[in-house]
Image (cartoon, rainbow, N blue to C red):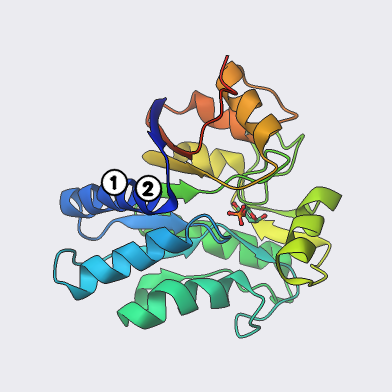
């Protein structure tokens, strides 16, 4: 694990954008898996700024999103698909053919799970998965207890995850979500975990214990050979 400490959100965004830029330089048609949440917002703004200034070319990049609430159409403003479109795809005018976002309202959930994995395979696998961290240690919607072998699946969302959505914008989140599984994440060539936000001290401590623990899904990432963690405001919670 490569650990980068930052002291403000702008620095987190810059360091993360540097890693994304390096990935795109290596492979312009990279497949990126993207998170939602407050943590990656400044990163998306930074990527946009660099692209507009001609410092970064995202023209060939391909995108999937990590997770989605079950039952929400991509047009629903609460959907993660709408979030990614709002913050990245639309402002950059990326070709929709280069993106495959979860369809939360898919009638046949199994078919949707298979289809998203098939797209990832067809695009040569995920080059860089960017991840946020949930208070209970979830990554994407891989909730505590999710086995390391889990592939894309429908997850029952924990009270903690739904409470975080409620606290963020007073909205009652659905009980289930589509998500890439831990196995999909571990298959990505590189992982970038962004750690910021209140109430995540226990999850941070679990990660820095350096031992895989099924109660803390984020610790499963420790099994990946190319994991970078950018952490904002570390407060001595490392052993
Ligand atoms: C949600 C998402 C996760 C995200 C997490 C953290 O539960 N499903 O993918 O990482 O929230 O969000 P934030 O960055 O707002 O703390």
Quarter of the image where the N terminus is located? top left
The image shows residue 228 at horizontal and vertical percentages of 39, 34
Q: Is residue 23 above or below residue 40?
A: above
Asked where in the image residue 219 lies, by quadrant, the reply is top right
Q: In this view, does 204 lie above or below 9?
A: above
Badge 2 crowding class, 10 Å Cα cut-off, few under 14, some 14 to 19, many 20 or more, is many
Asked where in the image residue 82 lies, by quadrant, the reply is bottom right
Q: Are marks 2 and 1 in contact (CB under 8 Å)?
A: yes
Is residue 95 visible to the viewer in this orientation of the structure?
no
The image shows residue 138 at horizontal and vertical percentages of 67, 43
Q: In which quarter of the image is ligand 1?
A: bottom right
At horizontal 50% and vertical 38% (from top left) the residue drawn is 233
Q: How far apart are marks 2 and 1 (CA)?
A: 9 Å
Residue wearing tag 2: 128
Secondary structure, mark 1, is helix
Q: In this orientation, which residue lies closer to the viewer: 177 or 47?
A: 47
Q: Is residue 90 above or below residue 100?
A: below
Quarter of the image where the C terminus is located? top right
The image shows residue 17 at horizontal and vertical percentages of 30, 53
Secondary structure, mark 2, is strand
Residue wearing tag 1: 19
Is residue 55 visible to the viewer in this orientation of the structure?
yes
Q: In this orientation, which residue lies closer to the viewer: 32 or 22?
A: 22
């Amino acid at each position: 694990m490569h650990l980068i400490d930052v002291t403000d959100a702008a620095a987190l965004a810059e360091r993360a954008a540097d890693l994304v830029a390096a990935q795109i330089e290596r492979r312009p048609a990279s497949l990126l898996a993207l998170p939602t949440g407050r943590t990656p917002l400044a990163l998306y703004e930074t990527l946009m700024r660099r692209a507009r200034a001609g410092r970064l070319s995202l023209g060939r990049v391909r995108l999937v999103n990590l997770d989605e609430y079950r039952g929400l159409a991509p047009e629903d403003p609460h959907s993660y698909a709408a979030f990614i479109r709002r913050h990245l795809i639309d402002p950059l005018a990326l070709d929709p053919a280069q993106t495959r976002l979860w369809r939360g309202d898919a009638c046949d959930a199994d078919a949707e799970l298979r289809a998203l994995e098939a797209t990832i395979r067809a695009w040569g696998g995920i080059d860089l998965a960017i991840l946020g961290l949930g208070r209970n240690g979830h990554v994407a919607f891989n909730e505590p207890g999710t086995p390391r072998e889990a592939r894309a699946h429908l997850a029952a969302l924990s009270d903690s995850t739904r409470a975080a959505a409620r606290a963020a914008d007073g909205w009652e989140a659905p009980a289930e979500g589509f998500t890439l599984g831990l196995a999909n994440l571990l298959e990505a060539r590189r992982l970038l975990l962004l750690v910021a936000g209140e109430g995540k001290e226990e999850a941070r401590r679990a990660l820095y214990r350096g031992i895989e623990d099924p109660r803390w899904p984020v610790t499963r990432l420790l099994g990946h050979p190319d994991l970078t963690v950018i952490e904002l405001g570390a407060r001595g919670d490392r052993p």
